[in-house]
């Protein structure tokens, strides 16, 4: 019996940058709650963005934010995993050197950018509904930074460079992962959506076989592996499909909604 359902958002539940839930999804979340089934939204997005998307059922879900670096349950922080100063400094220096791309940092309080009003910053604020402010130096903000995000509208992995991805491959203190083709996110190696799912399971006494998960990108892989019933979206890469047990139609065909409705309700 499924007791916990976790889904990625962008490219899985909604289109990238989507600001509205699929029709009927809030009602589905309410029905899951009535049946005692937990629902967690798992995203690279910050808490403010996920909460806005799920505004109609904001009190009924668990939030796995910043690719699993921050988990909020019942308005309380279940755990957070922040980058250390050395890693933040080195990664930011590299991101700053990529003049044709963009970047920002997510803290526990809000998100921060350094470049003035770029197209990306406006899009992040307007589409993702992120609490994003511009500062002179991210390293000097009064906040704990939990994720650094690199953006390139053509190909973020190519823009940030193969050497960078090899350096931060998760064997050290930081792992860099794609979160869709436009984003590379950098988080602590011991953090991730899978780690978040395990923390929720431990809190509620849920085992792996009682977890259902959906995802489409590299930052979803460990979450899919942490679930007994896992679905990669049809548009996912072969790496992600191999990590999942099944495939499901993507957001354009309401795959998450239909799968939950048919398999659980």
Image (spheres, rainbow, N blue to C red):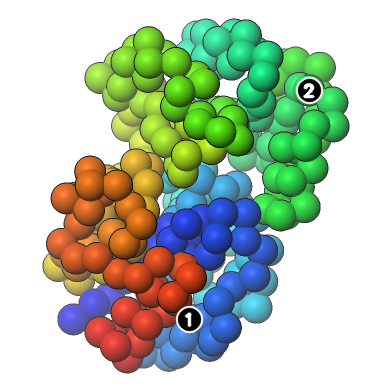
Residue 214 in the image: state x and y as whole percent.
Answer: 33, 62
Asked if residue 207 lies left or right of residue 144, the reply is left
Vertical position of residue 217 compared to residue 230: above or below: above
> Residue 201, located in which quarter of the rendered image?
bottom left
- The residue to which callout 1 is attached is 29
| Disc on res. 74 | none
Direction from residue 127 to residue 153 in the image, left or right = left
| Residue 147 locus on image (x, y percent) | 53, 32
Q: Which residue is mark 2?
A: 115
Residue beneath the point at 29% across and 47% down: 237
Q: From the image, which quarter does the N terminus lie in?
A: bottom left
Q: Quadrant of residue 231 in the image?
A: bottom left
Helix, strand or loop at disc 1? helix
Q: CA distance from mark 1 to mark 2?
A: 38 Å
Residue 10, visible in the rendered structure: yes
Give the residue displayed 70% in from the left and 45% down from the top: 124
- Total labels: the figure holds 2
Q: Residue at x 24, y 65 (%)?
A: 247
N-terminal label among 1 and 2: 1
Q: Is residue 241 above or below residue 118?
A: below
62 and 160: which one is in front?
160
Question: Can you name the residue that lies furthest to the right here?
Answer: 117
- Residue 176's place in the image compared with 222, above or below, is above
Closer to the camera, 221 or 183?
183
Residue 110's place in the image compared with 24, above or below, is: above
Q: What residue do we see at 55% from left, 60% from top?
A: 15
């Amino acid at each position: 019996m499924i007791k916990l359902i976790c889904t990625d958002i962008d490219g899985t539940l909604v289109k990238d940058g989507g600001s509205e839930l699929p029709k009927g999804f809030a009602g589905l979340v309410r029905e899951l709650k009535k049946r005692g089934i937990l629902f967690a939204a798992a995203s690279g997005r910050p808490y403010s963005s996920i909460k806005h998307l799920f505004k109609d059922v904001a009190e009924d879900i668990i939030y796995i934010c910043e690719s699993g670096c921050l988990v909020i349950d019942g308005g309380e922080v279940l755990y957070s995993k922040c980058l250390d100063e050395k890693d933040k400094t080195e990664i930011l220096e590299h991101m700053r050197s990529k003049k044709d791309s963009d970047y920002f940092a997510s803290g526990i309080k809000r998100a921060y950018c350094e470049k003035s009003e770029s197209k990306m910053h406006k899009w992040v604020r307007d589409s993702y509904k992120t609490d994003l402010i511009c500062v002179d130096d991210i390293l000097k903000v009064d906040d704990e930074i939990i994720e650094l995000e690199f953006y390139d509208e053509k190909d973020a992995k190519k823009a940030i460079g193969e050497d960078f991805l090899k350096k931060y491959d998760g064997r050290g203190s930081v792992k860099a992962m794609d979160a869709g083709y436009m984003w590379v996110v950098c988080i602590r190696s011991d953090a991730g959506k899978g780690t978040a799912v395990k923390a929720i399971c431990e809190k509620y006494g849920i085992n792996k076989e009682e977890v259902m998960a959906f995802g489409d990108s590299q930052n979803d892989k460990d979450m899919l592996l942490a679930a007994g019933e896992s679905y990669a979206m049809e548009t996912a890469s072969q790496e992600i499909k191999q990590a999942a047990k099944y495939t499901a139609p993507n957001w354009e065909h309401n795959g998450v909604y239909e799968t939950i409705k048919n398999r659980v309700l």
